[in-house]
Every structure is written in structure tokens, then in C-alpha cells.
Amino acid sequence: MRAYFDRLDWERIGLAIAAPVLAILFAALVTTIVLLISGQSPTLALSDIFSYDIHPDSTVAILNRATTYFLAGLAVALGFRMNIFNIGVEGQYKIGVFFAAYVAGIVGAPGPIKIILAIVAGVVAGALYAGIVAVLKVTRGVNEVIASIMLNYIAINLIAYLLQPNTLGFQAPGSNNVSTKPLPASAMFFTISTYGGNIWGFVIIAALLGVGFHLLLARTRFGFDLRTAGQSDGAAQASGVNTKKMILIALLLSGGLAGLTGVPELLQDAGSYNLTFPSGVGFTGIAIALLGRNNPIGIALGALMWGAFDRASNQLGFDGFQPEIVLIIEGTIVISVVVAYEVVRRYGLKRQQSRVGRELAAAAAQAAGSTNKEAAA
């Protein structure tokens, strides 16, 4: 055991922990200043967040919400590991969940088959939509950020068009609500009953995907090639890696995860898709992936924190806080994460350069000493 601990790079571990801690402290400081300027009590806000979130029903709600955020974070992180900024997760998420709901709703099949169809349709639709970005990038060199932003906008309006009674939408007789065809109770995913409520069964699926994400990137040749291509295009090509192929695969996988992101909400709660379906999940995934440093464990913690903020926003409203306070906290955390990671990265790079310099100087001094001894002899 002692030998194991001796092999650990404690400086690297310390820097990895310092970045998120610094980001959270900085975000807390900025939020405190904002609350004081607005004449509200930071102590009361923090008390509300912590006291309300530890209630059993709140804990279950946070866990369920974090499941969605975790999948969105994984989708973004997969692109980040390839040095691709897939900002189109929001559009891929919407396209994925819309077609998941539509396909599962119109197919006459037993409930379990509808569940499988919904999952497959969501993944395939999200992957194909991300594939547009991938093809544009590898064939025409179009920047993925610009293409993704445009496709996000197109996705929102495309779904608004498709979700009409005369296209793919469904309107029940006597109702003004338009949605996809509602799923029967037999097509809803299983839940885990607890004292605080029902935990979504998709929590297990998300955890397995997190493990698979780690194993794929850390334990396989594909993961090595993907990370190499992301770090250095020239080095990857020199080692025989087809970088265009890796970009295509990475974006398809990222889009597939994004397409799956909305399926838990569909199969565990909503039962159909309409224009009030949660939005902004893809953009939240970007913040969570940054906060979690593209690591599944970090992303899970970030997703739980985001879920806690969402849950606490209701209680803050009851105590007279503006709902925008939570948005300010979340936005401040994103900015803090970016700044803190860059500061820690530069600090670590500086220490590494200093250490290498000292080692080279020591080696040179040792070589000079040996030369002098030989000359004296």
C-alpha cells in the first residue's frame, strides 16, 4: 500500500483538486458580493440551498435531474477530449428526444419494445444531426462551433414546424395542447421507490455509460488515438491515426449521447414531447463538462451540484430571492471554472518548467564535476 502511495504524483493530484475548489470559492465570493449589493442576505441564501436540498424528496429530485445533466456533460466531454467544441449538444438533444417520442408514440408495440425504440431513435437522431457538423468539418473545413450554433437554431425551428397537428404533432380531441402521441404507462421506464420518492431507473444507465466512457477513453486503442488526435494533429498523423475519421467518430458518439440526454425525462416523467419540454440542457452540459474536467466522476459531481441549484431555486423564490440569483450563481461558476483552470494550468506549467530547469542544471553540474575529476587524475 505504501509503495502505491509513493508512486502517486501528489503535485498533479493537488493541482487537479485546486482548480474546482478555487472556482467554487471564487464563485461564492462573487455571488456574495452580488447578493450584498442587491440588499439580500448571502447567509440566508446559502442556508436555503443547503437546508432545502437535504430533504428526502429534494434529494430524489436532484438525483433525477442530475441524470439528465450527467448525460449532457458526457456528450460535451467526449468532444472536448478530441479538442472539439460540440456546442450543438442542445440541438442534438432536442432532435433526439423529439424523434424518440415520435417513433415510440406511433409504433404499435408492447411497452418494452417502445422503450427500446425510443432509446435507439434518440441516439440515432442525435448522432445523425451531429454528423452534419462532422461532415462539414472533415470535408469542407467548416468550424464546428459555427456549424453547431446554426444547427441549434435550425433544430428549434424544425421541431416547432414538425410539432403541428398537420405534420408529426398530435392533438387530442377537445384539447389545445399539441405534442407527440402520448406513451402508454407500459412504455415508461422503471423507477426505484424510496422514502423521498421514485428514483429514475435511468440513473443506472447513466452510471454504466459513465464507466463505459472512462474505459473507452482510458483503456482502449480507440481512446488513445482520440486523445492523441485531440492533443496534436501532426503527432497523430505521424503515428498513423486518421484524424478526419476520428473527428467523424467522436462527433457521432457525442451526438448519440446528446440524443439520449432527453430520453430519461421522456420515459420517466413527461411521456410525450411538447414545446414546454426542458430546454437549455445542452448548454448546461457544457458548463458541467468544464466543471468536471471531462472526467465522469467530476461530471457526476457537477451534475449533482447543478441539480441542487435547480431544486433550491424554488425555495429561494419563496424567501423573496429573485430566481435570477440562481442563474447568476451558475453563470459565475462557469466563468470561475474557466479562469481557475487556466490559472492552475499556467501555475503547473511554470512549476514543471522550473523543475526541469533544476534537473538539467544539476545534471550539467554533475557532468562538469566528473570532467574535472578526470582532468585532475
Image (cartoon, grey):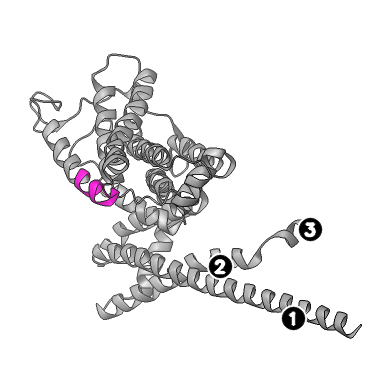
Q: Earlier in the sequence, mark 1 or mark 2?
A: 2
Indicate the secondary structure of the residue bearing disc 1: helix
Instruction: Identify the residue under disc 3.
Output: 3
Instruction: Identify the residue under disc 1.
Output: 365
Image quarter where the N terminus lies is bottom right
Q: Position of residue 55 (x, y in %)?
A: 43, 53
In reply to whether residue 144 is colored magenta, the answer given is yes
375 displayed left or right of 106? right
Viewer-side residue, 272 vs 299: 299
Q: Position of residue 186 (x, y in %)?
A: 35, 21
Over which residues does the magenta segment extend? 142-151
Q: Position of residue 149 (x, y in %)?
A: 22, 49
Image quarter where the C terminus lies is bottom right
Seen at 14% across and 40% down, the residue is 157
- Residue type pointed to by label 3: Ala
Mark 2: few/some/many CA within 10 Å (<14, 14-19, 20+): some
Instruction: Identify the residue under disc 2.
Output: 15
Dot label at residue 243: none
Seen at 57% across and 39% down, the residue is 220
